[in-house]
Image (cartoon, grey):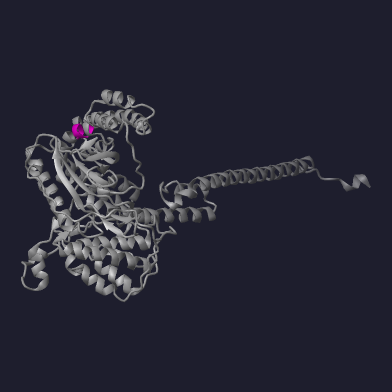
Amino acid sequence: MLLKERYQIVSVLSAGAFGQTYIALDTHRADNPKCVVKHIKPAGEDRRYFTSLSHRVRAETETLKKLGHHEQIPTLLDCFDYAQQFYLVLELIEGHPLSEEMPLSQRCNKRWSEERVVGLLREVLTILEFVHGEGIMHSDLKPDNLIRRAGDNKLCLIDFGAAQQIDKDFELALSGCYERPLDATKNNLENLPLGYIPAEQLTSNAKPSSDIYALGLIAILALTGLEPTQLNLDLDTREVIWKDLVPVSDKLVSIINKMVRYDFQDRYQSASDVLRSLSNMPVINQQPEKKSLTFKVPNFKLKIPKSFFVRGMGLGIAANSIVVAGGMYTLSQVSTSEGGTDVLYKATEEYQTGDLKQAIALAQSIPSTSPAYPEAQVALREWRHNWNIAAAEFMAAEKAFNEGRWLDVLQEARQIPDIYFWNQKVEVLVEQAKPNLEAEAQELLQKAYSRASLKDFSGALQYLKQIPNDTPSGVLVEQKLSEYTEKQRIKADYLLQQAYNRAELKDFTGAIRFIKQIPEGTTAYAKVKPKIAEYSEQQLLQAKSEKDTMSNATYRSGIQQQSRRREVRTIRDINPGTRLQEINAKSHM
């Protein structure tokens, strides 16, 4: 497929319900260099959503124009609209996401050294220093949005779909030239951070220090192997608890702690401030150097067509859904295909828009000699399978909606595979269910509190796990899940110890009663089955021993009774009777 009579699509990098990201060849340039085409497909007929979308797309385009001359930010090469859809053409960054370098757990041997983390901080802070200096906040900094470029081993910052302008009043407030009203800068202490997103950003009050917060959490992940959602927060201060998890110098702990302060006013206010604090710390880059494979983008002025932003099409998605395919511009797993690509793309369109039969027919028409044939065969298998799942999940969501089970509507909707046709159908149900979701979530939360007050942490966890993260109550759920899981573990260990105590007293019935109360999912639960088997066997041996003891006692008692009866009979045999006869001694003389 040739877009704008220029960009030859050679492979699909990723695809979603509302757009795709492709690898393409720029046929108007020497050597036909590769580039990334970000394709945004509005859907529906609601003009309100389109207005929001057009503003967001324009903002991303202007941001990339402004920042793209930095060597570690992808350059926007072109933008256009075609058939009432949007296209952004960007420089291709060949490499892998930083997330692939991150340790998977606290015990993972991929955990970073302190020196390497300092190097990471310096490199990313230098990029942020430039971005913030241009009046832009990235607002979505995370390991997946940092690409390790294969050519020179440098980190590149991608995906500016959520970028925001820095509030000029805030900049003046920092410089001391303007005093903001107290309530304009006060953080809302009722909010909790969510992943790499700090509390103020959740209330649409993002600051440059919001990006610094996210980078601090990336540093903690590299050092500890723990994702933000796995870290504990101090219940009083809301600060991240991490420094005792791994040995780290006090200076680096102090720097990172200041980066991730809960209140944005207590953090470093600029990337430059953090860099100054890091200036005397040792640094090491443990990534191997590689020969450059990237191409240099020439300087040119990009003109954005007005029609790109003014077409009256609709959009049936939320405003934050326009970041297509996560902005991941990497060639780690991409292979080029030529013949049959157009047919496969058309088949994918038919599949996404609901014509499964036509999609299958098109995919089956691709000849076995085409480079696209293997991909088409995989698609055929996945399409049939995913279509059946989507249909079944939609029916379940519809049934839940009709029965007023609002949380189940959301849960079933989440199980639907990424097929636009089915996503659009279930979205209608979800939107209608949303007003009732929070009430149901609050009810579950209160039930969880009630069970926890009775020390039934397993029951509390069952209620909490039913609450979706994207409800207002869901922000509190992650914290409570961690708290109740730990309390469940402590109670399980207590029950196990009580079982041991009863067993030591030979009360195996009592021991089994305690051991059966240990909930699944705890470390102590591994002892349940073996100990029940052991104590049951001890019960049998104890019962047999008691039976033998009783039998012996009964036998001895019987012998004693027989002995007494024989003694009685002997005495009776010599009994002279009740009348004694007097003997006349003289008659025997």
Look at 25% across and 74% down and name the residue there: 276
Residue 540: image location, x then y, percent? 58, 43
Look at the image and tell me whether residue 236 can be seen: no
Q: Is residue 53 above or below residue 175?
A: above
Instruction: Work out which residue is located at the far right of the displayed protein and give it.
Output: 589
Front position in the image: 512 or 304: 304
In this picture, is 432 found above or below 586?
Answer: above
Image coordinates for residue 498, horizontal then vertical, percent: 46, 55
Prevailing secondary structure class for the magenta stretch in the rendered image: helix
Give the quadrant of the N terminus. Answer: top left
* Range of magenta residues: 422-426
Quarter of the figure with residue 249: bottom left
Residue for point 29% across, 25% down:
362
Query: Hey, which quadrant is residue 407 in on the image?
Result: top left
The answer to whether residue 437 is magenta is: no
Q: Is residue 425 above or below residue 31?
A: above
Q: Position of residue 112 (x, y in %)?
A: 39, 63
Indicate left or right for 55 with 73 as reference.
Answer: left
Q: Position of residue 403 (x, y in %)?
A: 20, 31
**In this rendering, position of residue 424 left or right of residue 289:** left
Residue sitting farthest toward the front? 30
Q: Is residue 47 left or right of residue 412?
A: left
Please state which of residues 440 and 313 is positioned toward the viewer in this rendering: 313
Q: Residue 274: in sight, yes or no?
A: yes
Front-lying residue, 332 or 551: 332
